[in-house]
Amino acid sequence: MATLARDFAPRLRSQFLTDSFQRGLAHWNRERLEPGFPSEDWQRLFERDVRMERLQGAFLEELRAEVIDEAAAAPTDGDGFIAWFEGLKATGPGQGDPLFPWLAEQADRDQLRWFFEQEAAGEAGFDDLVAMTQVKLPTRPKLELARNYWDEMGHGTEKGMHGPMLDALVETLAVTPVIENTVWESLCLANAMTAMASSRRYAWHSVGALGVIELTAPGRSAATAEGLKRVGLSPKEARYFTLHAVLDIKHSEDWNREAIRPAVEEDPRRATAMAEGALIRLRCGARCFEAYRERLWG
């Protein structure tokens, strides 16, 4: 990992959107977020982490540069920003991508398996992202993120947790979601979400990015569930996507009302940060959909 830091430090920012960098960043994120124990070489690991934090920051700033002008045009009053934000469902990057009707209506089982393998390997863990983001947020946004997290946790029951539902589908489809088999665009999406959630200077970006997932996921989830059931999965086996096709509609309404609106009304600067985060998430998603289509249709 230290080699990765040395290799990429002097390069142009555009080099962050590459296969080798995103794989290295994904491995580092996975390692640093795993629970561990004290070790004798903690100083060496700390120095590595400092280098990687710097690279991760430069990567995220490159993504910000792509959206900063568009985000600056977003309204900064409560009503105006909510209208702009909800409009991303129709006009945001990647929305209406032809990949998803194709998954629902035409993809065969192997193609759906490959798509799901990419999605599962690039999954950053919505529950963990929410948990990291909520640290020290104001009361109303914090409470909404807490309610969302409790839903992700199945209201305290293992069978209702969303993460194990995803794991069960991995087993049903017999896929191996690992970094080495994943296109860099999917890793880039997970890396961007992790970067925003794990750094307090991008906390409001993370609120916007997580909120736009809730806003835009239902249609994609419904199409994926339809495709999985078409190739023979039972409603129970496709439950992960069926659930999100319905539940995320309410999650989005609650998130916009209880997390985004009061945050903007308290400090209009947060609107711009949340707009940037939402657009970063959507642009990364659009890159994924294009990469998936190239692989599946090419």
Image (tube, helix red, strand yellow):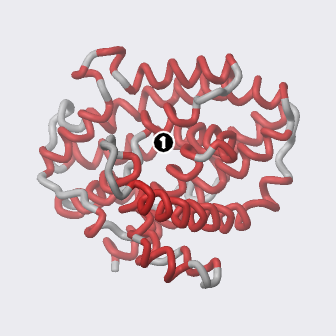
Residue at horizontal 28%, vertical 21%?
Answer: 160
* Residue 293 location (% of width, % of height): 39, 70
Taking 82 as reference, is 274 above or below it? below
From the viewer's perspective, is 51 left or right of 118?
A: right
Circle 1 packing at 10 Å, graded few (<14), some (14-19), many (20+), is: many
For the residue pair 219 and 184, the one nearer the viewer reads as 184
Residue at horizontal 32%, vertical 15%?
Answer: 156
* Residue 95 location (% of width, % of height): 56, 54
| Residue under pointer 1 | 217
* Residue 183 location (% of width, % of height): 36, 70
For the residue pair 286 and 123, the one nearer the viewer reads as 123
The quadrant where residue 62 appears: bottom right
* Residue 133 location (% of width, % of height): 57, 35
Label 1 element class? helix
Residue at horizontal 53%, vertical 42%?
Answer: 213
- Residue occupying the far front of the picture: 40
Residue at horizontal 27%, vertical 69%?
Answer: 180
Taking 225 as reference, is 284 above or below it? below
From the viewer's perspective, is 129 left or right of 123?
A: right
The quadrant where residue 37 appears: top left
Could you tell me the amino acid type at mark 1?
A: Ala
